[in-house]
Image: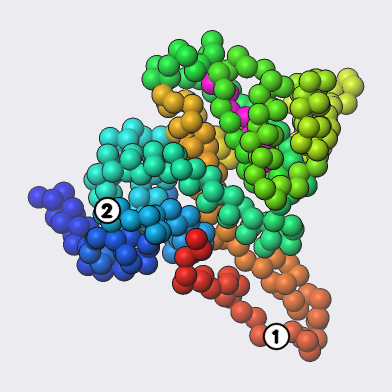
Amino acid sequence: MPYQFIITELAGASSATLVCDCYVHQFGAIAVGRRVSLYPTDMTDAEWARVRVSMPAWLEGRGGRPEEHCHREMIDAVRYVVDNGVKWRAVPADSPWWRAVYDFFRRWCRHGCVRELYQRLRRVERERQGREAEPTAGIIDAQSVDGADTVGAGSRGCDGRKRHILTDTGGLLLEATVTPANVHDSKAAPALVEAFMTEPGRLLKLVRADSAYQCEALATAFAAHGVKAEIVRRSDGSRGFVVLARRWVVERTLGWLSRARRLNRDHERRPDHHVQMVWWAGLVTLTRRMARQRLHWPEYRPHRLDPAGLNTPPRSRTSQPRASSAYAG
Ligand SMILES: [Zn+2]
């Protein structure tokens, strides 16, 4: 049958042809070879090179039973669930068993690994853009989503849940929390900023917000961390949708998150799993952006600045730095 023939071909290709350099393939208990990349959410080699050097080495030196599933395959499987919004049991058959993928997701949730990975990549991306790794200004906003019937009554408001995000001025995520939908934005903001500022090395000084955050208690809570709240208002008399200076960036980030179908509607029983889904969705967007990066004008087209071509080096298409072969612990 044609269907069986296709499955056999893919299984053979995945076990024999592709070599993986993930932590488990190097030091774990599995054979050489990984499955072939098939789905739009699978990381390209360029994406994997960036993820791999920033992955938290959560098992180094702690002993325990060696892992049995390729980290790259696991990350691809979770990305598939987040981007396509499928149930855990609907993880593709050529990925590791769904239960192993779900356990991997929960383990990363418990140890905060995906948030840590995103923060490392975010710092790398900011430095690539010529900015400081830690931002001094941020933007805050919230978005409500309907809850499916799997969302428990204890963690949902009348309609569902609300996700609160803090981004830098380029739209990269800095922090995310989830509350019941009936919690007002200004009530959730202090915990959001506190979660970000409690880690060492934070330099945040200014947070821009819309008029929903205009509240004396919020300003006081922000000031306790040395952060000033700036309210960006609509101009008087404006009607309908208006692009607010600076604040459109956070709206764009919420739009990026909504592309992940798992986030269109809240299916998570636990609020902390919803937060993890936000980080995973952000990770998909960020790694794609990092893998696409190339020199921009004028660097990419130096002849525009030097018509005679006297000082122009030969044009190179390999603008991306090579990934280090060592794990960053
Ligand atoms: Zn691997």
For residue 219, which numbered disc appears in the image?
none
Comes first in the chain, label 2 or label 1: 2
For residue 313, which numbered disc appears in the image?
1
- Whether residue 80 appears in this view of the structure is no
- Whether residue 64 appears in this view of the structure is yes
Apparent side of residue 98 relative to residue 171 in the rendered image (left or right): left
Which element type, helix, strand or loop, lies under badge 1? Answer: loop
Q: Residue at x 40, y 16 (%)?
A: 149
Q: Is residue 60 a member of the stretch shown in magenta?
A: no
Amino acid type at mark 2: Arg
Amino acid type at mark 1: Pro
Nearest the viewer among 86 and 180 is: 180
Residue that lies at the very extreme toward the left in this rendered image: 1
Q: Which residue is drawn at 37% across and 67% down?
A: 21
Q: Mark 2 points at which residue?
A: 65
Q: Which residue is drawn at 57% across and 75% down?
A: 318
Classify 165 as above or below 40. above
Residue that lies at the very extreme toward the bottom in this rendered image: 310
**Which image quadrant is residue 197 in?**
top right
**Which image quadrant is residue 106 in?**
top left
Residue 328 lies, in percent from the top left, at: 51, 63
- Disc 2 to disc 1, C-alpha distance: 52 Å
**Which image quadrant is residue 229 in?**
top right
* Span shown in magenta: 161-167
Apparent side of residue 253 relative to residue 89 in the rendered image (left or right): right
Dot 2: few (<14), some (14–19), or many (≥20) neighbours within 10 Å? few
Residue 292 lies, in percent from the top left, at: 56, 60
Nearest the viewer among 125 and 119 is: 119
Query: So how many labels did they put on this image?
Result: 2
